[in-house]
Amino acid sequence: MEKSLTSSLPSNPEPSSGVNPHSKMYIPSLDGMRILAFIIVFLSHTQIANAFPGNFGVTVFFFLSGYLITTLLRQEYDRYETIDFKLFYLRRILRIWPSFYLVLGLGAGLTILKLLPGEILLPAFLAQFLHYTNYYGIFFGGGMAAGSWVYWSLAVEEHFYLLFPLFYIALRKLPVSPRRQMLIFWGLCLAVLLWRCVLVFGFKVPELRVFCSTDTRVDSILFGCALAVSGNPALDTQDYSNKLWKYFFLPAGIVLILLSCVSRSPEFRGAFRYTIQGIALYPVFITAIRFPNWGLFAFLNLKWMRFLGALSYSLYLVHYTVLFFVWKHLPQLNKVMQSVIALLISFGLAYLIYQFIELPIGQLRKKFSRA
């Protein structure tokens, strides 16, 4: 869940014109896409809209994270012919950990005080604290603050970015051309797909094993990385005509996403859904970034949508725990009212975290950016 990277790219050149790799930029539409992804996740958790594919919202977050971080790494290497790993990891720690540990501690405290259902077990708390929530949940489960299971996706990202910058700079040093970098990332996505097929059809593993394991979900991030290194809509020249992107590739991507959500087969969901969605997100991201004022994409770039997008990381951290809190303390209300109240509380908490944690630490992070 890498939500603040677009805000760290302040200026906004025309996406179709390419950008100077020595400058920073704001990539349009992505904050709006981020808040839409959160709404999908939230609705899937409310118990009033179970048909909403919450896992697709997480896939969007993964794709977006891979695209943004790889774009930043690419720009840094283009300018300096190296990547400062110490600064990269320090910025990521400052971006992810303060809000993460604050919400983790608050959830544990509320559970101990019996204000949330369940109990806290030390092994489970340590799994979350040390960022292996996903594997602990698969093999053991339980003992976590209600609603904090969403941290599994953050564990996937932490595992991925522990090694990916090293892999990326190796490709740049060799050197490997941008197109071949893209093909390598696609090849890794194919390898993950084949591994999921082995697990699903060969070993008959539970769907949860495939849904939240790092080894079976990193392709959702890698698809975004592949877009960042070649055919990047914010950095590279445009292939094909505007009309082809708008009226063929984009509708084709949307249809693929819808088809991926229709099938209820556990085998299809476990093996193929994430690959189909990763491919389908390609034209969606490209057209959203290249044509931010066209059609519905203009809605994504409204000022208030961009602001809500800036809150999306904290919203993701708190929303499910808030839902459990409301369900416990306001059982007399219907599900719609409970969901509305939980959403309002979540926005309030996310805004406080943004104002008092993310903004001040964001200023500190700037000191660790390469000039």
Image: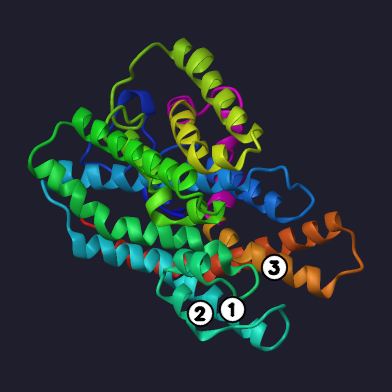
* Above/below status of 121 relative to 29: below
Is residue 71 shown left or right of residue 76?
right
Disc 1 residue type (three-letter): Gly
Identify residue type, mark 3: Val
Q: Position of residue 67 (x, y in %)?
A: 37, 42
- Lower sequence index among marks 3 and 2: 2
Of mark 1 and mark 3, the one earlier in the sequence is: 1
Bounds of the magenta segment: 286-311
Residue picked out by circle 1: 143
Q: Please identify, in this view, whether the residue under mark 1 or under mark 3 is nearer the observer.
A: 1
Residue 319 against residue 63 in the figure, above or below: below
Q: Secondary structure at mark 3?
A: helix
Q: Are marks 1 and 2 in contact (CB under 8 Å)?
A: yes
Measured in 3D between alpha carbons, the distance from the residue under mark 1 to the one under mark 2, in whole angstroms, is 7 Å
Nearer mark to the viewer, of 3 and 2? 2
* Residue 20 seen anywhere in this rendered image of the structure: no
Inter-mark Cα distance, 1 to 3? 17 Å
* Point 43% across, 40% down: residue: 197
Near-viewer residue (196 or 344): 196
Residue at the (57%, 59%) spot, across then down: 316
Tag 2: amino acid: Phe
Look at discs 1 and 2 and give the one toward the viewer: 1
Between 201 and 318, the one nearer to me in the picture = 201
CB under 8 Å between discs 3 and 2: no
Numbered label tally: 3
Write down the residue under mark 2: 125
- The x and y percentages for residue 205 are 50, 53
Magenta stretch: residue 306 in it?
Answer: yes
Q: Which residue does the numbered mark 3 point to in the structure image?
A: 322
Side of 32 relative to 183 (left or right): right
